[in-house]
Image (cartoon, helix red, strand yellow):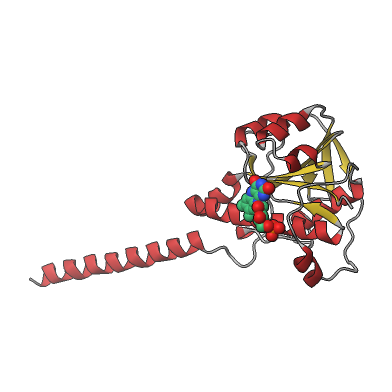
Amino acid sequence: MQEARCKRQEAGGKLIIAIVLSMAFALTACAPPEVQQAQPTVTKPAWKAEVISLPAPRLDSTVSLEETLRRRRSVRAYADEPLTLEEIGQLFWAAQGITDERGFRTAPSAGALYPLELYALTDDGLYHYLPQGHRAERRRLEGRRTALCRAALSQDAACQAPVVFVVTAVYARTAAKYGERAERYVRLEAGHAAQNLLLQAVALDLGAVPIGAFYDDQVQAALGLPADHEPLYLIPVGRLSR
Ligand SMILES: Cc1cc2nc3c(=O)[nH]c(=O)nc-3n(C[C@H](O)[C@H](O)[C@H](O)COP(=O)(O)O)c2cc1C
């Protein structure tokens, strides 16, 4: 009798421990820690590219945040004029620039795991942003604009903008810690980065539009992206046509 009661108590104790452990696991699986060392694993594009330094980003502005918020509108037609390397670099920086010596960036990231990889396609090539050192890999690519335009269902903005930014994500970086929850986190992060870029475009007096309607596989093929750099957003950017 006594023995049976002890066994029941022992089983009850094990059950409580199991519940506490599973609650702790669920909490850590869902909640990003406040601070974590930011060291994303880097999956590199297979292609060879020259690494260039981007001009140092501008860190202040005469345009207020409130004004950029008020002025932001999706712009789908642009003047026929290229963007400068300085502007391209500034837009990359706004989306994913490093702003802290511990590696933290302009946009928040679940667990500071930084799954996003950013690209920009121009008439003279493809830029892949390297946040460390504010640099970019540049690959000379010709004739890809048409393929990208088709991948985006021939939307005028994607076909005519002098630069199309592509926000891609390596889901595995976030999934390694957060499992299935990563899908949600990565998409939220793409939204943060995209909004930063859109607001920066306003502050630079440029026009931009976020595009979600495109064929993922065709975008990857057009740019020769690694299979695990999955496109989430296209953001054509250009000068305002006055
Ligand atoms: C997730 C998402 C996907 C979008 N996809 C497209 C798109 O494929 N093509 C497009 O022209 N605009 C696209 N937009 C822009 C919306 O059409 C636009 O934000 C909306 O009309 C409101 O206008 P506003 O951005 O000027 O405030 C998208 C916006 C979001 C948030």
Residue at (74% x, 40% y) in the render: 156
- Which of the two residues, 7 or 40, is positioned nearer the viewer here? 40
Residue 114 visible here: no
Residue at (63% x, 46% y) in the render: 212
Q: Dividing the picture into quarters, in which one does residue 165 lie?
A: top right
Quadrant location of the N terminus?
bottom left
Residue 50 in the image: state x and y as whole percent: 86, 34
Q: Is residue 65 left or right of residue 113?
A: right
- Which of the two residues, 181 or 89, is positioned nearer the viewer here? 89
Residue 58, compared with residue 80, is above or below; it is below
Residue at (33% x, 65% y) in the render: 19
How many marks the image carries: the answer is 0
Q: Is residue 122 left or right of residue 74?
A: right
Q: Is residue 113 left or right of residue 158?
A: left
Residue at (54% x, 54% y) in the render: 184
Residue 240 in the image: state x and y as whole percent: 86, 52
Residue 12 in the image: state x and y as whole percent: 23, 68
Furthest residue toward top? 143
Residue 206 in the image: state x and y as whole percent: 84, 54
Residue 131 visible here: yes
